[in-house]
Image: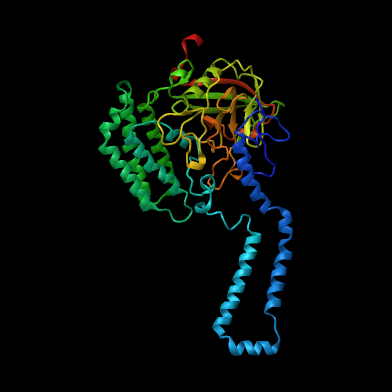
């Protein structure tokens, strides 16, 4: 694969496509050169404004400003007397206030880590408005992104959206808006009760009994909506958080029952590709290449082999996950070495390129019903993916070394999302450029401990093999 375009090491915008390519490690992830250049220019301009030489001049500039101010306001006793006679007291006060404000503004401009002007979203170009706006909302965990990606009954989505908002409200450090929370839960509960028949009718007949059990638990079970409402009235944030997680888990289970397959038809030209028509779980067993041990984040005994589980989302990326699941079943990743940079853990690119399918770049835009193929998303126009890259532990395919319209047949990476390498809105500068197809749900604490040279001893498909459809000639 051809190396990616890189920017100056100071440029924080160089995420996966270029920061991944560190001076110490050579990797094989590429990105659209024009995109790289655009991000590099905007980022370098920020860095130049904050370089240390400029900061070293600040004391001199500030002292100069004050000396000029004193010089301009200094005058003889006779002049002072004339001034007192001809300039009203209020006018002199206004003049002094204006001078003081001017000095303060200059000092703030010099000491501020970012320019004061031109940073409001309304004055930014569309791309920067999305990347830098603090109001940009994307899922911050793999679990939330996976939950939002399930194509389920509209009533269930309405219930889910009402409850997901509670997650944001619980993060408010000041006084919690319990009134708003109560309103959201009551709305969700009303929909669940009024639309019970529609919700259960969306579940296949052979799964309906299981669905009824989960539905009952959602309404009246421990950690269900009724209990959640009580905890909100008691203003107990800890119990609210636990009950909310339980309710959202029940909702996800119901939605998965409502979505037994793909909700769209794949393009005819891809009919001979492997595809995953739902969810699957892959477990990686990782060992240190130097014989050292992994240390569980929660404490405990160091372990020689660490387990990482990844949930594959075939609803949003059926071709990418289908190819990946088949590679896992075929043992393509067993014994494979890993490469690491500050922002990603990549699989070895030395695997035979004939192993795996050359799958087109596959990205599902938020609000759409089917993925786009061979097309990146236009973040500057507000397009966001259903499966965002801007989540720690996101799993995606590297670009093909021939064309960026295709993913690599077999090279993938774990994305180590770091907000310091992103815009103020928390979006990676490479968002919408790669085929994200799943998230690390178990073992996220192991990811930062993985180093170059560590080995994947085994990769197994634990769940979802019944969702994997293989073309006849490849069986």
Q: Which scheme is used to colour this image of the protein?
A: rainbow
Identify whether 450 is placed above or below 91: above
Identify whether 6 is placed above or below 315: below
State whether residue 223 appears in this view: no
Q: Which residue lies at the image location 51% right of the left edge and 30% below the top edge? A: 375
Identify whether 253 is placed above or below 474: below
Camera-side residue of 238 and 168? 168
Camera-side residue of 259 and 55? 55
Q: Which residue lies at the image location 53% right of the left edge and 46% below the top edge? A: 425
Which quarter of the picture shows residue 7? top right
Residue 282 horizontal side relative to residue 299, left or right: left
- Image location (x, y in percent) of residue 37: 63, 40
Q: Which residue lies at the image location 57% right of the left edge and 57% below the top edge? A: 117
Labels in figure, total: 0
- Image location (x, y in percent) of residue 444: 57, 34
- Image location (x, y in percent) of residue 406: 55, 25
Camera-side residue of 133 and 143? 133
Can you say which quadrant of the picture contains the N terminus?
top right
State whether residue 4 appears in this view: yes
Residue 92 horizontal side relative to residue 208, left or right: right
Residue 338 horizontal side relative to residue 237, left or right: right
Which quarter of the picture shows residue 25? top right
Residue 430 horizontal side relative to residue 291, left or right: left
């Amino acid at each position: 694969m051809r190396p990616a375009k890189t920017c100056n090491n100071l440029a924080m915008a160089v995420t996966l496509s270029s920061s991944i390519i560190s001076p110490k490690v050579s990797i094989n992830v590429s990105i659209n050169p024009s995109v790289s250049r655009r991000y590099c220019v905007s980022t370098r301009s920020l860095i130049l404004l904050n370089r240390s030489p400029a900061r070293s001049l600040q004391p001199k500039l500030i002292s100069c400003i004050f000396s000029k101010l004193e010089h301009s306001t200094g005058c003889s006793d006779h002049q002072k007397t004339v001034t007192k006679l001809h300039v009203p007291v209020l006018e002199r006060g206004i003049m002094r206030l204006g001078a003081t404000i001017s000095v303060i503004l200059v000092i703030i401009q010099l000491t501020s880590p970012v320019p004061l002007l031109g940073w409001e979203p309304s004055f930014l170009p569309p791309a920067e408005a999305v990347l830098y706006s603090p109001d940009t909302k994307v899922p911050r965990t793999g679990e939330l992104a996976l939950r939002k990606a399930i194509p389920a009954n509209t009533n269930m989505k309405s219930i889910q959206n009402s409850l997901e908002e509670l997650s944001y409200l619980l993060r408010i450090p000041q006084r919690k808006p319990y009134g708003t929370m109560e309103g959201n839960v009551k709305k969700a509960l009303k929909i669940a009760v009024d639309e019970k028949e529609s919700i259960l009718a969306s579940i296949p007949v052979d799964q309906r009994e299981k669905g009824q059990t989960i539905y009952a638990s959602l309404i009246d079970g421990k950690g269900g909506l009724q209990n959640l409402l009580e905890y909100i009235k008691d203003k107990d944030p800890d119990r609210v958080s636990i009950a909310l997680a339980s309710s959202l888990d029940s909702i996800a289970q119901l939605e998965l029952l409502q979505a037994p397959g793909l909700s769209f038809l794949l393009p005819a030209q891809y009919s001979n590709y492997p595809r995953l028509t739902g969810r699957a779980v892959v477990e990686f067993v990782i060992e240190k290449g130097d014989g050292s041990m992994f240390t569980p984040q929660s404490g405990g005994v160091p372990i020689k082999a660490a387990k990482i589980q990844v949930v594959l989302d075939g609803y949003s990326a059926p071709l990418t996950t289908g190819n990946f699941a088949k590679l896992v079943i075929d043992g393509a990743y067993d014994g494979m070495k890993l490469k690491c940079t500050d922002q990603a853990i990549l699989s070895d690119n030395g695997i035979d390129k004939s192993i795996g399918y050359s799958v087109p770049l596959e990205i599902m835009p938020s609000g759409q019903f089917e993925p786009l193929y061979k097309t990146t998303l236009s973040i500057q126009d507000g397009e966001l993916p259903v499966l965002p890259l801007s989540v720690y532990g996101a799993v995606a395919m590297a670009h093909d070394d021939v064309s960026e319209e295709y993913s690599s047949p077999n090279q993938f990476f774990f994305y180590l999302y770091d907000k310091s390498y992103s815009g103020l809105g928390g979006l990676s500068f490479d968002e919408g450029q790669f085929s994200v197809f799943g998230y690390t749900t178990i073992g996220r604490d192991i990811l930062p401990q993985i180093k170059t040279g560590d080995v994947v001893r085994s990769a197994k498909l634990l769940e979802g093999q019944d969702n994997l459809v293989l073309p006849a000639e490849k069986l």
